[in-house]
Image (tube, rainbow, N blue to C red):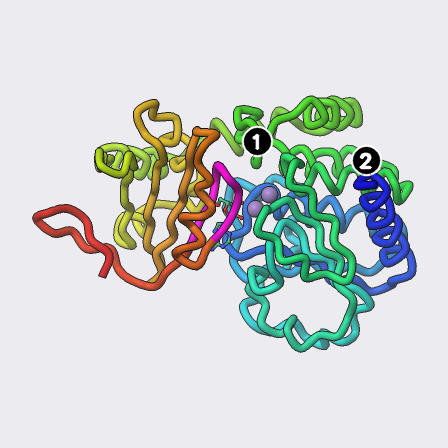
Amino acid sequence: MRYELANIQLNRACYLLKKSKYILVCGHTRPDGDCIGSMLALKLALNSLSKRVSCVISDTFPPNLWFLPGIEQIKSRKKKVKKIKKFDLIVSLDSSSLERSGLESLRASTSPVLNIDHHQDNSLFGSVNIVKLKASSSAEILYNLLLRLGVEITRDIATCLLCGIFFDTDAFRNPNTTSRTLEITSKLLSKGACAKKIVRYLLQEKSLSTLKLWGKALARLSENRKLGIVSTVLSEEDIKQSETEGLEGIANYISCLPQAKATLLLSEKNGLIHGNLRTQRDDIDISKLAFLFGGGGHKKAAGFTISGKLVKTRAGWKVE
Ligand code: AMP
Ligand code: MN
Ligand code: MN
C-alpha cells in the first residue's frame, strides 16, 4: 500500500514537471551541499528536457561548493523573486516548510508546489509531496525521480547528486547511509561523478582561517554533566575573522565525543545565533530539542536559529 502511494506521488510529480515550462527551484536558508547539489542536478535535468528553470536561494552559499557545475546560475535573493506568478511550478528541495526557503514572495504565489525532502518535520506543504524520511538526502530521492522522468544522468548531474549524498551522510559516516545510498553512489560514479573534487572541497581542503576557527571552537568545548551535553561557541567576531561559512563540519566533528548524549555548536552572525545539534544515540531525538527553539531537522542532526548575542562572562558564555 505504502509502495503504491509512493508510486502515485512519483507519477504525479513527473506529470507536473513534464507539463510545466517555467519552473522555479528553491532550497532552504543557510543552504548546504544537499540543498545546492539537488537544486543544480534538477536544473540540469530539466534544462535537458527544454524547460526554463530559475534557481533561487535567500542566502549566499558556502564557498566550498563553488566547484559544482552551474553554480553561478543560482541567484541569491533575500526577499523578491520577480514576477513569481509567471512560474508554472515551484519545486522546493530539502526544506521542511516553504518558510524555510527564506523567500517571502513565495507566500503570495498560487503556482503548484512540488515538495521533495527527507526531514521528519516536513509539513507536507506541497501540491505533491515526495517526502522520504529514510532517504539519506534529498539528492537520493531526486535520483529516483530523475530516473522515472527518463532523464539521462550526465556527468555533471551525477556530480551534483553525489555532492548532496556525500554532504548529508557526512562522507558516508552517518547512520542514514543505507545499502540503497551506496547503490546509487555506485551508479553515479559509473556515470562519471567527480568524487575527487567532492572529497577535496567538502572534506579535506580547509583554509588557514578555517582551521584557526576550528581550533577556537575545539578549545572552548565545555561539558554539562547534568544534561550530558557538550557545547561550544563561536562569536560574530570569531566568524568575521574567517572565510568559512559551513560550520557543519565542526558540528559533525565534535558529535563523535563518546561521553556526550548530544553536542551543540552555537555560532553568531548578523544578530542571529544558529545552533547545530547532533547526537549519536538511537534513543534520543535531537530534533525535539531544536523544535523547542523554533527549529527542527532529523533525529540525529538538527538545528535552530534564534536572535541574540553570544557574550563571554566569568561564569562562561551566555546568550543575551
Ligand atoms: P545544521 O545543524 O544546520 O547542519 O542542520 C542539521 C539539520 O537540521 C539539517 O537537516 C537542517 O535542514 C535542519 N535545520 C537546521 N536549522 C533548522 C531550522 N532553523 N529549522 C528547521 N530545520 C533546521
Ligand atoms: Mn539541507
Ligand atoms: Mn538534506
Span of residues in magenta? 296-304
Q: CA distance from mark 2 to mark 1?
A: 22 Å
* Residue 238 location (% of width, % of height): 27, 48
Q: Quadrant of residue 157 in the image?
A: top right
Q: Is residue 11 visible?
A: yes
| Residue 212 versus residue 191 in the image, above or below | below
Horizontal relation, residue 224 to residue 160: left or right: left
Q: Would residue 301 be counted in the magenta stretch?
A: yes
* Residue 19 location (% of width, % of height): 91, 60
Seen from the viewer's position, the closer of residues 183 and 279 is 279
* Residue 4 location (% of width, % of height): 86, 42
The residue at the point 88 percent across, 49 percent down is: 11
The residue at the point 46 percent across, 55 percent down is: 295
What amino acid type is highlighted by mark number 1?
Thr
User: Tag 2: Cα neighbours inside 10 Å, few (<14), some, or many (≥20)?
Assistant: some
Seen from the viewer's position, the closer of residues 214 and 2 is 2
Q: How many marks?
A: 2
| Residue 139 versus residue 181 in the image, above or below | below
Seen from the viewer's position, the closer of residues 242 and 28 is 28
Residue, disc 2: 154
- For label 2, the SS is loop
The residue at the point 39 percent across, 26 percent down is: 256
Q: Earlier in the sequence, mark 2 or mark 1?
A: 2
What amino acid type is highlighted by mark number 2?
Thr
Horizontal relation, residue 227 to residue 105: left or right: left
User: Tag 1: Cα neighbours inside 10 Å, few (<14), some, or many (≥20)?
Assistant: some
| Residue 152 versus residue 124 in the image, above or below | above
Seen from the viewer's position, the closer of residues 285 and 22 is 285
> What numbered label is drawn on residue 169?
1
Q: Is residue 270 visible?
A: no
Q: Is mark 2 within 8 Å of ligand 3?
A: no
* Residue 99 location (% of width, % of height): 57, 65
